[in-house]
Structures are given as C-alpha cells and as structure tokens.
Image (cartoon, helix red, strand yellow):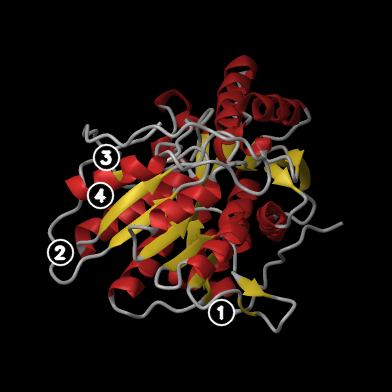
Amino acid sequence: MIKSKRVLAASLVAALSLTAAACGDDEETPAATDAPEATEEATDAPAATDAPADTDAPAATDAPAATDAPAPSGESFNVGLTFDIGGRGDQSFNDSAAAGIDRAAEELGITFTEAEPNADGSNRAELLQLQADGSALVIGVGFLFASDVVAAAGENPDTNFAVIDDAMLDFDNDAVPLCDNCAGLTFAEEQGSFLVGAAAALNSTTGTVGFIGGVGGFGLIEKFQAGFEAGAKAVNPDIVIIPQYITEAPDFDGFFAADRAKEIALAMYDQGADVIYHAAGGSGAGLFEAAKEQSEASGSKVWAIGVDSDQYFTSSEEVREYILTSMLKRVDVAVFEITKAQSEGAFAAGNTVYDLSVDGVGYSTSGDFMTAEQIATIEDFKAQIIAGDIVVPTVPEA
C-alpha cells in the first residue's frame, strides 16, 4: 500500500510508478511482493508531534509515496524517508520521524518521498535503491536498514544516507565510518529512561515497578531497561523491578504484539507492580489497555509509562489518564537536523548522539499527573546527568 500524502511532481510520481514493480526482498527473508503503483490521490497527513507511540499490525508498502512541500527559499532537493514496518501513523518511532520530515518540508523547503517496507521487511534494500534514484538524502528509520544502507551507499556515491539507531561505524577498524556517504543517528535512551525510572519510583506506592521490552538480545532495548532501573533505584534503592521481554532477537515480532504486552502487563500488576514502563513500539498499546483494565477491576489506579513520543497525545483517549509520562526519543530532531545539514552542505559521515544535553531524549509531563516536587526531583537528576555527576549505565544489572 502506498500512502500518498500530496503530489510531489507529475514526473516523480510517474517515475515511482514505473520503478515500483522492481521492489522485492532483502537479505533476511526473501519473499517477492507485488509493488503497487504510485497514486496522485491526496490524503491528509497527521499533525507533527514531539516524538513517536503505539499501533497494531502495519500495512505493507513497496514504493515511496510522493509528497510535496512549500516552495523552497533556496535550492531544493528531495529526501527519501524510508520508514520501518508500521510507517506513518504508528503513534511511535515512525511518527516521530514523520514529524521531523514534515518540519523540514515547512522550514527548509525540501520535498520528500515516503516508503514503508512490507509486513516482513523483506524489501528494505529495494526501497532504499528506489529512494536513492530520486533523492539527495535517504534516511532509513531503524537499525535494520544498516547493512542495506552500506550496500546502497556504495552503489549510489552521489547520494547521502542516514540510519536511525545505528552508529554506522566500523568498530573492528577504529570505529571509522562504514561509508563516506552514510551517517548514524543514535540516542542516549538510557538517560531518558533514567528520568522516567525516577518518575516511576516517585509514584509507586507498592515499591514494585515493571519493565516490558519489545525485543531483547541485541543491545538496544537493554539500554532502556538499564536506565529505567538506575533511575528507579536512585529514588528508592530497595525498589523491586520486574523486567520481561516479549521476544528475543532475531524474532522482532515483539514490537508488534500488543496482545502479548497486555498479558505480560496484567501479570506484573498482579505481582504488585503499580507502574510499568514499556520500550516495545506498537506493543505498548497493550500495556495501556492493561493499565485501564487493572485500575477499573481493582479500584486502585495503576500507571503505564510510554516511550518514543508523548503517548498521552498519541494513544486513544480512553487510556490517557493511565499514562503517567513518556520517555521522549527525539527521532524528529535527528531527521530534521540531518536534513538541515544536507541543505547547508554540511552532511558528514559518522555518528551523532542525541542525549539530554541537546534535548535528544527527555520525558513528558502531559496530563499533569506528577507534582511540582516530583518534577523538581527529576529535573535535578537531569542536571546531574548533563553535568556528568551521574553516569547512566547502558547494560542492566545481572
């Protein structure tokens, strides 16, 4: 399915229509898929938010959707934004990237095309090449694009590439960039998770909190867990933390299993947890449903903590009163900044880390559920982390 937000230009739409049929599969699960034709039918795009949230099963697409933008003040260029599975509208990671490119279109006058992998992600490589055919900059939203970006960058030396959540460095060779025209955009997730861990402990009356990870075993989600645990223990050294992952890599279905997340969350609430943090992408919707169900059934309110975007705004209205806060991972900032660098001729290979010092991560206060005193405590922790007085771990305690 192609999500056509507005029409970029008739020639680009035609080009995408002609090349879309070439889309196929990538290195992990080769499965040929038929590519739909590009369409010029306009649809409304979602409003930009601070960062991404949760969704159910994603829709599959094989080709980029053409999108136009305001007339540029200077020389314009096209950005090929290539989402991970779920695409625009996932209320989480992808939506944050979408907010960043929408801002870039408005403020920088660039044009952009959107692409979303099919349901098993087997056509990532083809989408990257299709985007590179008409873009000065191609952005892969998610670390699963990393190896395909290295290959595409070699085939397209005049196009720059960026990958969200991968450093794009050769750590076996003094951490040099993997390619001269590819950049990595990573985040200090552990720092933002520390702050919501402190929020969890400050609001827990049982002394037990939980952590639900989408997929374990590849190092990224463990950073969320490590920071959350450190923040909770900074408030209450004796707090009990119950961690559980939905799946283990290479099974990445844990990011799209809301029913399983709900089941895990209800079990944690039964074990005494009264605040649960998720780092599970679309599966987080199940946590929010569980918080509502448990609160209504027990008559005692329990909390959920969102991730990536301010999920108080992106989740359904009936669960908002149970979302204490969200750990903000500013993918939107990273997408905007790399696009700005491209527009200024300042694109550079290598890794950029977005941490608390540049508001690359943070926490939300929507809903006004936390007291001024609690927020002051969290802000003090934030200042100590930025100053280097607190070094947040990236690996959970054994």
Q: Which residue is mark 3?
A: 5
Please name which of the two marks, 3 or 4, marks the residue nearer to the observer. 4
Judged from the image, the secondary structure of the residue bearing numbered disc 2 is loop
Q: Which residue is mark 2?
A: 72
Q: Residue furthest right?
A: 398
Q: Amino acid at mark 4?
A: Leu
Mark 3 surroundings within 10 Å by alpha-carbon count, few (fewer than 14), some (14 through 19), many (20 or more): many
Q: Amino acid at mark 3?
A: Lys
Q: Which residue is mark 4?
A: 12
Q: Residue furthest top?
A: 297
- In space, the residues marked 2 and 4 are separated at their CA atoms by 17 Å
Left or right of 5 on screen, residue 276: right
- Mark 3 or 2, nearer chain start: 3
Please name which of the two marks, 4 or 1, marks the residue nearer to the observer. 4
Vertical placement of residue 236 versus 263, above or below? below
The residue shown at (29%, 47%) is 15
Judged from the image, the secondary structure of the residue bearing numbered disc 1 is helix
Left or right of 6 on screen, residue 322: right
Q: Position of residue 367 (x, y in %)?
A: 41, 40
